[in-house]
Amino acid sequence: MPSPDCIHMISIETLTTLYTRSKLKMFCYDIAAERFVFLNPAFTEFFGHTIQKSSPYGLLEMIHPDDRQLVKNSIHECLQNNQVEDIECRIIRKGHERWLRVDAYLTKKADGSRSIIGHAEDITLFKEHWYALNKHNTKKNAVLNILSHDLAGPIGLIGNLTELLVKETLPLNNPKIDNTLKIVNKVAKRSITLIRNFINTEFVESEAVKLLKRRVELVTKISEATIDYFQMEQDLNLKFAVKANKEAVYVEIDEDKFMQVIHNLISNSMKFTPDEGEISIFIEEQDFAVVLKVSDNGIGIPEKYHQTLFDKFTLARREGLKGQPSTGLGMSIIKTIVEWHQGKIWFESEVGRGTTFYIELPKQPLISLKETV
């Protein structure tokens, strides 16, 4: 925002030209009169000229039904805190869906009257690119976990078999066989370490990046993220399921980081669930929170490790059922990312009966439009 001194130096004609030619959709809404007192051409071109005489309820009808509560909450926040920024919502216009990013500010005059001024930017193209990139990244994470599971298991088995062969061939007293088996065993262990280090590096590096939170429909997002696991069910010899108590559940998250959490929990379940086992995700929308459950019917976590599971380099780290190693970092990073989202994570587990991880994320309270204006 320009400084007051800078504004005084700008002529009314210059400001008028700026507002008229700007591609930003600028507006000023008089709260007491319940009407727009200023709309620039970009605004009226986007929403239609009839919006100038409309009440806020008329404009609200153009907002995607799933985003209306977000807009109501944002208006309330603007009245309470004098401003809101980077609010993203969808507009249904002429049968087409467009994305807008809105900044709004509360202004007060000496006579006590109040107005909301601000601007909106069409970010539809940006969102399309964002979703394409994020979909690619989600697929990458799933493929990495599947490859880790598929490669580390057989390679670990090769390592174990070569150790057995070393013992069985000792009586032969054949240095060439002994040396060959030692090389195979060494390469197998090095390959497993390489695979796990690569996965861990990907996860740790993603943790170091700042959160970029966006409003995400979680049921669709997690269903898309797990499709590769479903397609590989037969090869993985595991069953997967995703369920929810509502068709659509919205929450503010950093997609990339949060899906890393989901993938890491799935990967962890894959390590400790035997063949023919089941891994399921359940999404539950509650009044003030969204709760996710990632469950398996695997070997469970011994009670002695329950208190330290989320510690960095925890002693609770264990090899997977097929020899997959663990650094003890994964759960610590998961907890950190969940807490960055103002959420909390906990688990229930019993040896021989499986484990369920719970993630609780806060939701904005429901606010009616009448409460705001």
Image (cartoon, rainbow, N blue to C red):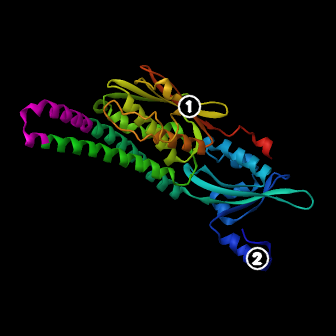
Find the residue positioned furthest to the right: 111
The image position of residue 363, as x and y in percent, is: 65, 38
Residue 172 within the magenta-colored segment of the rendering? yes
Q: Nearer the viewer, mark 2 or mark 1?
A: 1
Q: Is residue 89 left or right of residue 153?
A: right
Which quadrant would residue 336 be assigned to in this image?
top right
Residue type indicated by callout 2: Cys
How far apart are the alpha carbons under marks 2 and 1?
53 Å
Disc 2: CA contacts within 10 A as few (<14), some (14-19) or many (>=20)? few
Disc 1: CA contacts within 10 A as few (<14), some (14-19) or many (>=20)? some
Residue type indicated by callout 1: Trp
Residue 151, compared with residue 18, is above or below; it is above
Which quadrant holds the N terminus? bottom right
* Residue 243 visible at all: no
Dominant secondary structure (helix, strand or loop) of the stretch shown in magenta: helix
Residue 6's label in the rendered image is 2
Question: Which residue appears at 67% of the width and 41% of the height?
Answer: 69
